[in-house]
Image (tube, rainbow, N blue to C red):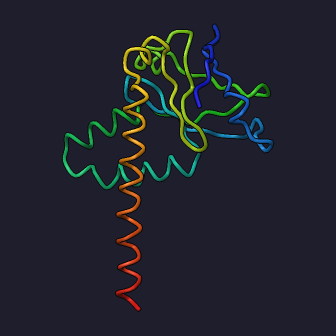
Amino acid sequence: MQYPCVIDSQRRLAIPKPWRLDTDTEETEFYVALGTGPSLEFYDYEEFEKRQRISRQNINTKEKRILNMGAGSLSMIVQLDKQGRFSIPQPMLEAAQIHTNVLCLGATNYATIIAVEIWDKIKPSLDEIISYNEMLSADNSVVNIETKVMVTETQ
């Protein structure tokens, strides 16, 4: 889903209500990192850990380690306040070219925060989205076929 949101004067963003869980409290933590587009991405703990494992596997050169440090310097753990908001440091907002009006895109354990004007320039057409979803479905079918073959071969 797509939710219009506002970064307030204290650099806080309220998580869209449909994304909040009944269990969210001031102790609830999310991970925020610089994304593509430019944008910010936020993850739950499980998704962040998964991305960290992938990142660690791919830092096999000095250049990649330096890039990984740079990405890490624009990542942080955030906690919600009583209104379901979290603060975003100014350097992260500047890197993502975010000022006030943003869209929160996505759902579940991963989402993107992007400036409205940037999204308007880069958003895919409906046909592109449909093609992408068809490609993902086809890729999933290949994975399912390979899994079935592997299971069959091990029996």
Task: Please provide percent x and percent y for residue 3.
Answer: 62, 23
Q: Residue at x 43, y 15 (%)?
A: 120
The spot of residue 119 in percent (x, y) is 44, 18
Of the 4 image quadrants, the one containing the N terminus is top right
**Point 40% across, 25% down: residue:** 125
| Quadrant in the picture for the C terminus | bottom left
**Residue 28 horizontal/vertical position (percent):** 70, 40
Q: How many marks?
A: 0
Does residue 99 appear left or right of residue 142 in this picture? right
Which residue is at a point 22% across and 52% down the rendered structure image?
A: 60
Say whether residue 36 is left or right of residue 111: left
**In this orientation, which residue lies closer to the viewer: 150 or 118?**
150
Task: Give the side of residue 155 with respect to residue 102, left or right.
Answer: left
In the image, 129 versus 78, the foreground residue is: 129
Describe residue 8's horizontal placement relative to residue 121 as left or right: right
Q: Is residue 27 above or below residue 124?
A: below
The picture places residue 27, in percent across and down from the top left corner, at 73, 40
Residue drawn 52% across and 48% down?
Answer: 47
- Where, by quadrant of the figure, is residue 133 drawn? top left
Indicate whether 110 appears above or below 9. below
126 in relation to 149, above or below = above
Quadrant housing residue 152: bottom left
